[in-house]
Every structure is written in C-alpha cells, then in structure tokens.
Amino acid sequence: MDYSNIKHFELRRKFWKIAGAEIYISDPTTSQEVGYIKMKAWKLREDVRIFAGRDMQRELVQIHARQIIDFGATYDVTNSVTGQPMAALRRKGLKSTFVRDHWDIYDSAGNTIGSVQETSGMLAIVRRWIEIIPYVNLLGIIFSFIAQTYVISMKQADGSDAVAARIVHRKNPFIVKMDVDMTDAQVAADPLIVLAASAMLSVVDAAKNS
C-alpha cells in the first residue's frame, strides 16, 4: 500500500480497556483498515509499533522513548521497512500538563521541522486543571467527552509554519475516535510522520485509563 496517497486517517479504540489498548487505523474515504497498534499494559508510552494490519505481519513505524520518565520525553520515529530514522517527537511536559498539548517535531539531525498544537482554546486549560484537582473526577469524565482539536504544522523554507493536518479527537463512553485530515493542508508532510504524531496523542490518552 502506498501511504503517501492517504490524506485522511481515523484512529479508533475502545474507551474502557484495562489491559493495554488496541488502536485501529483506517482510511475513512475507503473504509479500508490501513494500520494497527497493540499496546501492552503499563508500557503504553515506551515502545509503540504501527503495523499495516491486525495480523502484525508488516511493521511500518517504530516509536521509541529515549527515556523511561516521559513528563517531557522525546520519542524517536523510525521507518521499520527501511530502518531509517524519520523524525523525533518531543512533548513539552509543563505546557502539555497545565495548559494544552504541545509537541515539537524534529528531523534526524535535531532541527525543528514542525509541531503538534492543541487548539481547543480555554476548554483545553479547564480540562487539564480538572484532571489534576482532587475530587472532581466526575467533571473530568464529563469534560473528556468534549472534542479536542489539534493542528500539525510544518516549517516552510522561509521559517514560517503552515498547516499540514488537522485533528479532531472525540470520545463517547464506548469508542474514542481521532480524525486526522490532510486534505486541505497548506504544506505537504510525510503521512507516516503525521500518523506517528497522531498515534502518540492517542497512545498518551489511552495510557490515562490503563
């Protein structure tokens, strides 16, 4: 399958999953499954592997944390087919915990080439403070069902940022969906890097319930 032609991904998983998580990746324009992630319990953020299908016979991408403590961890993204490094994703720990999700994207030489930024506005801030304040778990559950939005931006030759993908993250008590749309992108980006960044958002979210 030529992933360079895919401009739309949907990542789907069960809301309640105690022993790890399974994330199914499809192309909503064709309803074809194009990827699969199976995570082990308690290791959701240390070693993520994206497969072409749930038979796990063909590995596409490996995402590996450089360190175990992941408050502001860096994750190396490798093309499993070629063995070549593709990018690195670094989560801004303080900002992501207290304000809104923010990840920087680096190339294999360590240069900043893009970012993943939550764009949910004040809802992002309210949601985070509810999550860390004791005795408001019920409110946290309610706010978790309000959609989160993100933008993946890539740097252009002049140093400015341009939108490469838009993400909408929705939940209900049964299913969590992440819609990743590159159809109206202002700049082209490697779909596998976009998929890796989206997968990490989904994996980190899944880890909260494990």
Image (spheres, rainbow, N blue to C red):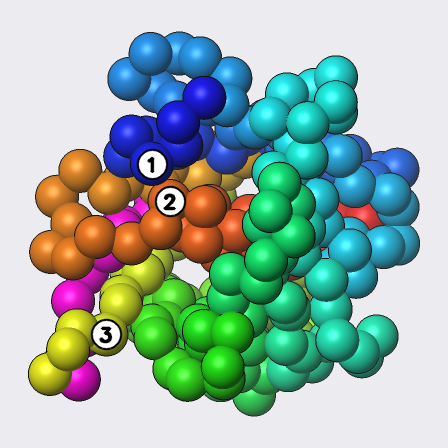
Secondary structure mainly formed by the magenta segment: strand
Q: At 27% from the left edge and 66% from the top edge, which residue is drawn?
A: 153
- Rounded to the nearest angstrom, the CA distance separating label 1 from label 2 is 6 Å
State which quadrant residue 31 falls in: top left
Sequence-first tag of 3 and 1: 1
Instruction: Give the number of the mark in front: 1 or 2.
Output: 1
Kindly identify the amino acid type of the residue bearing the numbered disc 1.
Ser
Which corner quadrant holds the N terminus?
top left
> For the magenta stretch, what is the residue range?
159-170
Judge by depth and name the residue closer to the eye, 167 or 111: 111
Q: What residue type is labelled 2?
A: Pro
Residue marked by disc 2: 191
Q: Report crowding for label 1: few under 14, some 14 to 19, many 20 or more residues within 10 A (C-alpha).
A: few
Numbered disc in front, either 3 or 1: 1
Q: Which residue is drawn at 35% across and 50% down?
A: 190
* Image quadrant where residue 80 sits: top right
Label placed on residue 155: 3
Residue 119 on the magenta segment: no
Q: Can residue 102 be seen in this view?
A: no
Residue 49, placed above or below residue 100: above
**CB atoms at circles 3 and 1 under 8 Å apart?**
no
Mark 1 and mark 2 residues within 8 Å of each other at the beta carbon: yes
Asked whether 167 falls inside the magenta stretch, the response is yes
Residue located beneath label 1 in the image: 4
Is residue 85 depicted above or below 8 in this figure? below
Report the front residue among 161 and 3: 3
For this rendering, which residue is in front, 136 or 120?
120
